[in-house]
Amino acid sequence: MSGFDWQFFVEVLIGGLLSGVMYSLVAIGFVLIYKTSGVLNFAQGAMLLFAALTFVSLVERGVPFALALIITFAVMVVIGIAIERVVLRPLTNRSPMTLFMATLGLSYILEGAAQLIWGTQVHGLDLGIDDVPFEVGGVLISQFDLFAAAIAAALVLFLSVFFRYTRVGLAFRAVADDQFAALAVGLRLPRIWATVWAVAGLVALVAGLLWGARLGVQFSLSLVVLKALPVLVLGGFDSIPGAIVGGLLIGATEKLAEVYIGEYFGGGTESWFAYVVALAFLLIRPSGIFGQKLVERV
Amino acid sequence: MAEHDLPLLVVDGVSATYNHAIAALQGVSFAVRRGEIVALLGANGAGKTTALKALSNLLPAERGQITAGSIRFDGRDVTATAPADLVRSGLVQVLEGRHCFRNLTVEENLITGGIGRSARRPEIADDLEKIYLQFPRLKAKRRTLAGLTSGGEQQMTAIGRALMSRPRLLVLDEPSMGLAPLVVRDIFETLRKLNQETGLAILVAEQNSTVALKYAHRATILENGISVLSDSTENLRNGNDVTKFYLGERTVPLAVAKPANQLTEAGT
Ligand SMILES: Nc1ncnc2c1ncn2[C@@H]1O[C@H](COP(=O)(O)OP(=O)(O)O)[C@@H](O)[C@H]1O
Ligand SMILES: [Mg+2]
């Protein structure tokens, strides 16, 4: 026993943080929709699967990478708008539970549609990034994870700029802040919701490609949605910074737990540890790290 | 055309419920002409807010329904027009409790009003300057989150945001609520100035009848969801016992009061 191996610790930590980035991506898709329309979109995972599957299938049929990306994005936008129009608009004013059930049904429809169109086999997805670890100061870092983190960071940056500096972004924040006031001010809520679903589709596309490249594109991909739940509990359902930090925290603690205390539980802690963290957190701070504190109305 | 002689807003015999059950309005009639300030008076629960939501077609969003009567703004059937289109046609409401976007800055709040009428960027910049002239306090606070400003500043932000939509009829629901008398006076002075200088028609719901009667040209009194009295504020101020009864000095039994006026023969 020669003391604590810091180098190894840092390596595990970084690996955890990087995989946490991918959890964050899925969670951000949730938050976007929850913030603007109060819908807990269980179909985010199915959207992610649908995007990845569409992209892979196009590429496998010889469509060039960039074109496939554009087509898939267009498909996701259409799906987003269709969901708003066909499923959510007729359900306006229904209880959050009804809306949640609707998205649950939606996720089955999307998965079914994906299966029908693209078949059930597993696809490999090659984004052209080798997963060769490289070394920084004695610490091994996965090149793919780093790439994924960079893409995710770029997406988050893009979204921040979009929401901060564009009109649509301002309208989005207004709706997220006070839906009734937004209606009275003359903002067209259905149009904003459709936009948000389209953006959630974009997030699903990016997350789907990154997850797909790592795990292979298969139907279990839609289950990453279950990984997002603890992240949301931790970060708050209505906070994008919360989704980011929550994802990183879950990713890191999950990996550290696996490596350092996993043996006491016979390994495999990765599949449930996030839930324990989330549960513990729920007891301490139910609104999440960055969840909206209910400000008193004057 | 004769169209132009019609009042800008005609509310005619409107009844409304919430959840198809709770009756909130049971025959409300009043009208607002161009260039006029009209007050809608009544105690808490009289139905002022419901009437205002009805005329901006916001009741459906609150699970409310109009069960009888009609509302026309500039000839158009309000209940068949989306709230966003009403705003674009010049009917803009400042909601009860202000409803600022608390996590947006004061200036962002104002800009949403411009977006709400699909204004172009230079127009929005122009309108912002005008609002800042009306409400210098807002200019000083333009970068502050609206949720962190005082009640009076939030009311000004909400009014400024509505003005950014270039209304022809500005509707305000209890702008005096929770504000110090001096601030209330400021706000009503600004409204009067807007009315005099630009001919903006204003409909204001108030429990504070003293202030409202001072600034409005005419007023309608609501009681239990019924419009019981409409008259010029001059008459109401020098009022007889019936007026005093409805404005809080209960000296006359209800039976004495005659049902209100109908200003709305032209309505149907
Ligand atoms: N959202 C709502 N759901 C059910 N009932 C309501 C709702 N809003 C108001 N009411 C009822 O409608 C009546 C009129 O209320 P309101 O229009 O708010 O009056 P005021 O604005 O004059 O105080 C009251 O009896 C009130 O309880
Ligand atoms: Mg009210």
Image (cartoon, grey):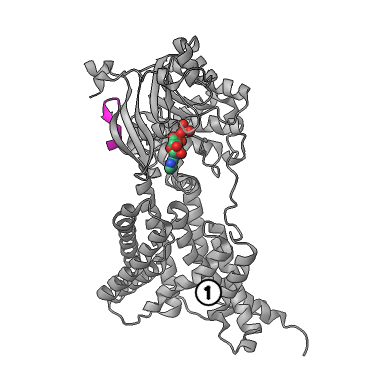
Question: In the depicted view, which residue is nearer to us: A166 or A227?
Answer: A227
Q: Residue A11, position in %: x, y?
A: 63, 78
Quarter occupied by residue B171 = top left
Question: In the depicted view, which residue is nearer to us: A177 or A127?
Answer: A177
Categorize mark 1 by other alpha carbons within 10 Å: few (<14), some (14-19), many (20+).
Answer: many
> Can residue A290 be seen in this snapshot?
yes
* Chain where mark 1 sits: A
> Magenta region: which residues?
B73-80
For label 1, the residue is A145
Quarter occupied by residue A115 = bottom left
Determine if the magenta segment contains residue B211.
no
The vertical placement of B164 against A120, above or below, is above
Question: In the depicted view, which residue is nearer to us: B56 or A113?
Answer: B56
Determine if the magenta segment contains residue B79.
yes
The quarter of the picture where the N terminus of chain B appears is top left
Amino acid bearing label 1: Asp
> Can residue B94 be seen in this snapshot?
no
Q: Does the residue tagged 1 have its C-beta within 8 Å of any atom of ligand 1?
A: no
